């Protein structure tokens, strides 16, 4: 009986007991694992009594007539409300423009689909809820271009990898602005960037952009203070902080020294804030306006940064889950009192966010004003650090005690633990999807597009209890239809395209569901093989996915052709001898196949440089509405930004380009490839229009 109750409880909360692995083999989650995951979801399951109690609670909730704070609907489609209201009831609707409309529920107690897109307040029989009416699909490239079909192209860049004089050791928003201008001048429509979510200001040893403290705020290390405050103010702050030599040394390094560079940048920002906070600064009004608009989310994040620094200083660590219990609650009087005691420290972090926001805004304005159809494409990480700001401030909506990862497969026999936490489906519903909506708005604020990392997370995620192995996890299902409607609504509101990273094990039917909402999938050249060594013909590439030569987790084409990624795996002892031999044989077959494919279309290539030229032409000629070329492939680099499965040994998230950003696209190889790509895209448009 208890086993049946356990399985019923799991099913009620969306936890999958049965699943199919990457080899299409059925798998089943062990009961002990189900218990642990359920505990992490907030449903006690340690023994039979706990399971029975949790099951009664969720069944009671399922059977209740509790009205959620937010419901979603499709434009023009009726909304079934029979669970909550009776047929013939009158719905008093207050639209976003404050106009009012009265609608009568039909014989099936459905609300007529007569409301426009937007968030509307609906009151029926004295009970109120928000209704989010979504457009049929997201804003698309068809909407963005003047002459469909879209055959756009752009570049992809790790922001920190850019180099400019006086940058302090890594690329920032001013370097991004310069790249946006030069790329736009050459005809680019988009510039996709690595995530710039807020990382912990106090813990700079952890600098992966995909493990943020918060996806609601920005990484303030990327601010370009001189763009707002002026070169003179920055120069004086550098002198006041005694940073001249340090910054010069950092600028000369071939790799980003994140801890040292972050320390120097924070000292610079503190010196700038000291000057800004004295007297009546000309930009004070703009800052105050920004802080007011940032509201609770900004205030909580700034308070968290100050609390975290204090906790570290007092030996309590950076993880809020180990702090005094009063500090666990963002609304606790002790937290309020602490913030009131240190107003300047809290304001400093708001100041840094303001500088970064305005710097990013400038970069997007530069991209669009110089002719890009899309401009910046932001990157949304799949989760956030459970020890970080977002998990602290949105505890009912994030699962801080479960980590996102992947089950074992042929490439990762132990599975993967990404060390981040995800949304709680139940928490999202309880809170009217607040955390999801605010996250979308934050990331679309200064972007013409958004890439959703691991888009499968809109439907399900592999969750692992803290302290367990990746294999000891289970899939949790998410309210896909609601999430897609909200995504479409925010996309149209911001006139921003949506890209879904759908690589790896994709649940059946998900790609079709994403395509129906105009979410572009992602097709990567090395993966586009109908069988090993046989690459997908040009006209067989889909027209509902972007095309690219690579990602940050893959060796660039030059490195792929040379098996540099396999060399690294061998050097770091990530693979045994048999696996290495198998990988090298497979890579030889694949690289030979790519050369044959390209030769059939463009003739023989005398060396790898010309293979890369032809590969860029190849995906340029596909029907993809958007082609993105990583800067590494444009320049012929052979080293990748990140080697998955490593935290030491390989310089993940640290590589920099040698040339200044102003000169990058004038590189002989880069200029040639840009011309080839632009020609291929024009030819594809002529062919398909």
Image (cartoon, helix red, strand yellow):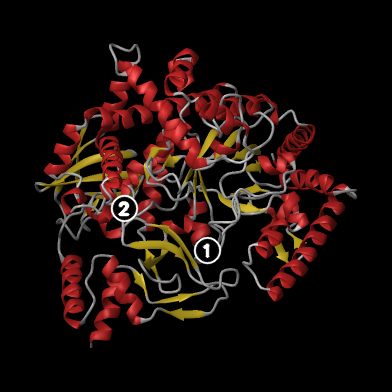
Which residue, given by chain and number where applicable, does mark 2 sit on?
319
Q: Residue at x 37, y 29 (%)?
A: 352
The reply to whether dot 2 and dot 1 touch (C-beta < 8 Å) is no
Give the quarter of the image for residue 461.
bottom left
Location of residue 37 in the rendering, given as x and y in whole percent from the top left corner: 32, 70
Observer-nearest residue: 120 or 524? 524
Whether residue 485 is visible: yes
Dot 1 falls on a residue whose secondary structure is loop
Which residue is identified by label 1? 506
Splitting the image into 4 quarters, where does residue 66 fall? bottom left
Give the side of residue 380 with respect to residue 412, left or right.
left
Q: Is residue 361 above or below residue 687?
A: above
| Residue 117 percent coordinates (x, y) | 34, 39
Residue at left offset 37%, top offset 26%: 270
The answer to whether residue 446 is visible is no
Judge left or right: residue 289 versus residue 569. left
> Callout 2: helix, strand or loop?
loop
Residue 54 % position (x, y): 19, 72
Position above or below: 552 against 26: above
Disc 2 from disc 1: Cα separation = 33 Å
Q: Which quadrant would residue 490 be assigned to in this image?
A: top left
147 lies left or right of 442: right
């Amino acid at each position: 009986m208890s086993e049946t109750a356990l399985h019923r409880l799991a099913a009620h909360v969306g936890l999958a007991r049965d699943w199919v692995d990457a080899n299409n083999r059925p798998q089943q989650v062990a009961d002990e694992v189900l218990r642990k995951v359920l505990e992490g979801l907030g449903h006690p399951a340690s023994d039979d009594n706990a399971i029975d109690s949790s099951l009664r609670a969720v069944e009671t909730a399922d059977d209740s007539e509790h009205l959620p704070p937010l419901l979603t609907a499709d434009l023009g489609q009726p909304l079934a409300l029979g669970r909550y209201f009776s047929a013939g009831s009158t719905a008093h609707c207050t639209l976003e423009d404050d106009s009012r409309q009265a609608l009568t529920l039909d014989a099936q107690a459905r609300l007529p689909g007569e409301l426009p897109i937007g968030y509307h307040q609906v009151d029926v029989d004295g009970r109120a809820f928000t209704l989010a009416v979504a457009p049929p699909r997201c804003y698309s490239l068809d909407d963005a271009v003047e002459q469909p079909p879209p055959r756009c192209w752009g570049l992809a860049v790790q922001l920190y990898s850019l180099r400019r004089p006086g940058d302090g050791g890594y690329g920032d928003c001013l370097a991004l602005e310069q790249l946006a201008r030069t790329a736009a001048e050459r005809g680019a429509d988009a510039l996709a960037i690595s995530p710039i979510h807020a990382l912990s200001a106090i813990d700079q040893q952890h600098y992966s952009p995909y493990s943020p403290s918060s996806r609601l705020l920005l990484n303030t290390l990327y601010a370009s203070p001189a763009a707002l405050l002026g070169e003179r103010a920055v120069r004086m702050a550098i002198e006041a902080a005694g940073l001249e030599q340090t910054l010069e040394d950092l600028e000369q390094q071939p790799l980003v020294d994140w801890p040292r560079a972050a320390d120097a940048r924070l000292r610079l920002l503190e010196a700038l804030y000291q000057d800004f906070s004295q007297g009546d600064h000309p930009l004070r009004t703009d800052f105050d306006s920004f802080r007011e608009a940032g509201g609770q989310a900004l205030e909580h994040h700034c308070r968290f940064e100050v609390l975290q620094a204090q906790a570290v200083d007092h030996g309590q660590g950076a993880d809020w889950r180990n702090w005094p219990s009063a500090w666990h609650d963002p609304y606790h009087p002790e937290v309020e009192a602490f913030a009131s005691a240190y107003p300047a420290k809290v304001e400093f972090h708001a100041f840094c966010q303001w500088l970064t926001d305005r710097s990013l805004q400038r970069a997007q304005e530069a991209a669009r004003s110089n002719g890009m159809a899309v401009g910046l494409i932001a990157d949304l990480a799949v989760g956030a650090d459970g020890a970080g700001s977002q998990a602290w401030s949105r505890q009912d909506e994030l699962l801080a005690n479960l980590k996102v990862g992947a089950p074992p497969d042929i490439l990762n026999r132990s599975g993967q633990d990404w060390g981040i936490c995800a949304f709680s489906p139940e928490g999202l519903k309880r809170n009217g999807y607040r955390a999801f909506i605010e996250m979308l708005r934050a990331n679309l604020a200064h972007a013409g597009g958004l890439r959703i990392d691991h888009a499968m997370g809109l439907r399900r995620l592999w969750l692992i209890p803290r302290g367990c192995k990746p294999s000891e996890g289970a899939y949790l299902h998410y309210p896909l239809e609601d999430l897609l409607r909200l995504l479409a609504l925010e996309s149209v509101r911001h006139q921003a395209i949506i890209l879904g990273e759908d690589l790896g094990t994709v649940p059946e039917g998900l790609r079709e569901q994403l395509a129906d909402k105009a979410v572009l999938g992602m097709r990567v050249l090395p993966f586009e093989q109908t069988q090993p060594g046989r690459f997908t013909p040009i006209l067989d590439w889909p027209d509902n996915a972007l095309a690219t030569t690579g990602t940050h987790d893959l060796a660039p084409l030059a490195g792929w052709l040379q098996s540099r990624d396999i060399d690294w795996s061998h050097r770091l002892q990530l693979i045994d001898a048999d696996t290495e031999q198998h990988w090298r044989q497979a890579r030889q077959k694949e690289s030979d196949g790519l050369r044959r494919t390209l030769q059939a279309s463009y003739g023989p290539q005398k060396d790898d440089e010309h293979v890369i030229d032809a590969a860029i032409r190849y995906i340029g000629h596909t029907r993809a509405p958007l082609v993105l070329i990583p800067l590494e492939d444009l320049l012929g680099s052979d080293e990748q930004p990140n080697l998955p499965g490593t935290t030491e040994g390989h310089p993940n998230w640290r590589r920099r380009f040698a040339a200044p950003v102003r000169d990058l696209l004038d590189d002989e190889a880069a200029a040639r490839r840009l011309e080839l790509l632009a020609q291929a895209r024009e030819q594809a448009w002529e062919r398909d229009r």
